[in-house]
């Protein structure tokens, strides 16, 4: 560095020192030393920026906290809504079950003294099986007939505690003795893999038409007479002495909520006339 530059630098530094000294000696109109006014003026933007940053951080923390509370409140409201919807569905199911039970009672008025209502808990239509739950630990006898709101659905094959295993009439080995409502045509309804009933032993000369309703005849000793079993869907000629007849089950097996187990129906039956 040249001597001239050193001289200039020293002059500037000396001038700054003199200005600072003068500022210390001089007072602002408010009585405050001018140097402190300068220092405060220099620091004020930084203080303002710090306050702004602090306010922003505070607002951000408050916003995050409020958002968290809103999320928690929203989740609680969602859970309350889901609970209310589930309760509403349960109430609707219970109401529908009560209506089905009332329909069952009206369908078998002579058999309700010993009948046991049960709620379906499992169904496997492909395998022709259903599980129903009774209200008490009551031993249900094997071969007890089971009816739903529109007709026969099967028979009890096993009972354990409150659970009853039911073989549906659509099971390939299930068989129900049936007849037309006027009793002129009688036969045997056999289950099938298709979910329909194959009506066997119907003579070729029998007067049986599509749409005819089939009811239990009571000849099998399992089902009481007069209960709806199915409706004829097809009647065809065959090479043997019997017609090929198919029927659709009367009961809606896929949606039955409540069933009636006709326990001891022979003892409770007051009349041998077909049930109306």
Image (tube, grey):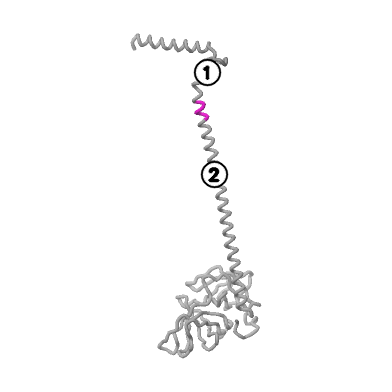
What residue lies at 36% left-to-right and 11% top-to-bottom? 5
Disc ID at residue 114: none
Magenta span has 211?
no
Task: Say what secondary structure mark 2 lies in.
Answer: helix
What residue lies at 51% left-to-right and 77% top-to-bottom? 249
Rendered image quadrant of residue 94: bottom right
Task: Say what secondary structure mark 1 lies in.
Answer: helix
What residue lies at 52% left-to-right and 87% top-to-bottom? 186
Pointer 1 or 2: first along the chain: 1
The residue that label 2 is drawn on is: 68
10 Å neighbourhood of mark 1: few (<14), some, or many (≥20)? some
Q: CA distance from mark 1 to mark 2?
A: 45 Å
10 Å neighbourhood of mark 2: few (<14), some, or many (≥20)? few
Please provide the residue range marked out in magenta.
46-51
Which tag is nearer the camera, tag 1 or tag 2?
1
The residue nearer to you, when weighing 26 against 226, is 26
- The image position of residue 127, as x and y in percent, is 48, 73
Q: Is residue 161 visible?
A: no
Dominant secondary structure of the residues highlighted in magenta in the image: helix
- The image position of residue 29, as x and y in percent, is 56, 15
The residue that label 1 is drawn on is: 37
Left or right: residue 188 versus residue 116 is: left
Up-down relation of residue 237 to residue 70 (above or below): below
Rendered image quadrant of residue 182: bottom right
- The image position of residue 4, as x and y in percent, is 35, 9
The quarter in which the N terminus is drawn is top left
């Amino acid at each position: 560095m040249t001597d001239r530059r050193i001289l200039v630098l020293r002059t500037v530094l000396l001038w700054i020192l003199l200005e600072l000294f003068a500022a210390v000696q001089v007072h602002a109109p408010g009585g405050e030393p001018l140097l402190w006014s300068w220092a405060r003026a220099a620091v004020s933007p930084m203080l303002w920026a710090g306050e702004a940053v602090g306010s922003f951080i505070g607002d951000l923390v408050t916003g995050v906290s409020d958002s968290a509370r809103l999320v928690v409140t929203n989740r609680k409201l969602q859970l309350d809504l889901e609970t209310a919807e589930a309760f509403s569905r349960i109430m609707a199911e219970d109401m529908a079950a009560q209506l089905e039970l009332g329909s069952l009672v009206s369908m078998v008025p002579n058999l309700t003294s010993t009948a046991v209502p049960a709620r379906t808990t499992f169904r496997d239509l492909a395998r022709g099986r259903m599980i129903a739950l009774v209200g008490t630990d009551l031993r249900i006898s094997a071969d007890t007939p089971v009816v739903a709101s529109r007709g026969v659905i099967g028979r009890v094959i096993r009972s354990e505690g409150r659970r009853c295993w039911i073989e549906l009439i659509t099971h390939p080995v299930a068989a129900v003795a049936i007849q037309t409502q006027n009793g002129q045509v009688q036969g045997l309804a056999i289950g099938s893999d298709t979910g329909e009933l194959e009506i066997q032993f119907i003579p070729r000369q029998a007067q049986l038409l599509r749409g005819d309703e089939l009811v239990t005849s009571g000849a099998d000793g399992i089902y009481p007479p007069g209960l709806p079993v199915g409706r004829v869907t097809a009647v065809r000629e065959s090479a043997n002495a019997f017609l090929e007849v198919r029927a659709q089950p009367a009961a809606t097996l896929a949606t039955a909520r409540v069933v009636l187990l006709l326990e001891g129906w022979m003892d409770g039956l007051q009349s041998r006339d077909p049930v109306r």
